[in-house]
Amino acid sequence: MSARVIGLHVHGRKGAPVRPVSEVSGRVGGGIVGDSHAGRTRRAVLVVDRSTLDAHGLRPGDLREQITVDGLPDVTALPPETLLRVGGLTLRVNGPCEPCTRIGGLLGVEDVEAFRRSLVGRRGAVCTVVAAAAQARIGDAVQVLAEVAPAP
């Protein structure tokens, strides 16, 4: 099975709920246009695989990710500098998203620390847009273009 985009979300401002959208444009050197993380350079875009959501009884966007994919369960483990093509966007993986207790609080989880621990190694990859030839849309293919080993 090839990986596909199953959810796209933007935060209008920090702390605001995510809003589902059907397509997004990328800001080269940053994140998703219209998202509160668009101007960031390292933690600009969070990509999460559906398997993490399913394992926790969550829906796309619940982990405040901008891009939810299906078919890339090891996205969190991709090495830094790996390139991903998501529709018309090319993303560079900067590393794994380290889970925090804040997300459990936003979701109303009873034991936020246990929830945080359950996401270790599964919270997704933080990325930066490095090319934006076109938009990314729900249903678009997701490809690992190049896995570059981190420098020693």
Image: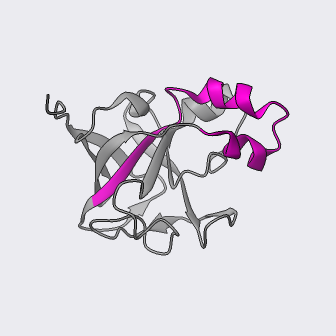
Residue at 30% of width from left, 60% of height from top?
129
Determine which quarter of the picture holds residue 84: top left
* Residue 10 vertical placement versus 4 (above, below): below
Magenta-highlighted residues: 100-129
Residue 131 at x, y percent in the picture: 23, 63
Magenta span has 135? no
- Which residue occupies the foreground of this view, 80 or 141? 80
Determine which quarter of the picture holds residue 137: bottom left
Q: Is residue 129 left or right of residue 38?
A: left
- Which residue occupies the foreground of this view, 134 or 62? 62
Residue at 40% of width from left, 33% of height from top?
75
Q: Is residue 12 left or right of residue 83?
A: right
Total marks placed: 0
Residue 92 at x, y percent in the picture: 27, 49
Q: Give the position of the N terminus as an image quadrant.
A: top left
Residue at 22% of width from left, 42% of height from top?
81
* Residue 111 vertical placement versus 45 (above, below): above
Q: Give the position of the C terminus as an image quadrant.
A: top left
Residue at 53% of width from left, 35% of height from top?
123
Residue 29 at x, y percent in the picture: 27, 65
Residue 138 at x, y percent in the picture: 49, 56
- Which residue occupies the foreground of this view, 115 or 58? 115
Magenta span has 111? yes
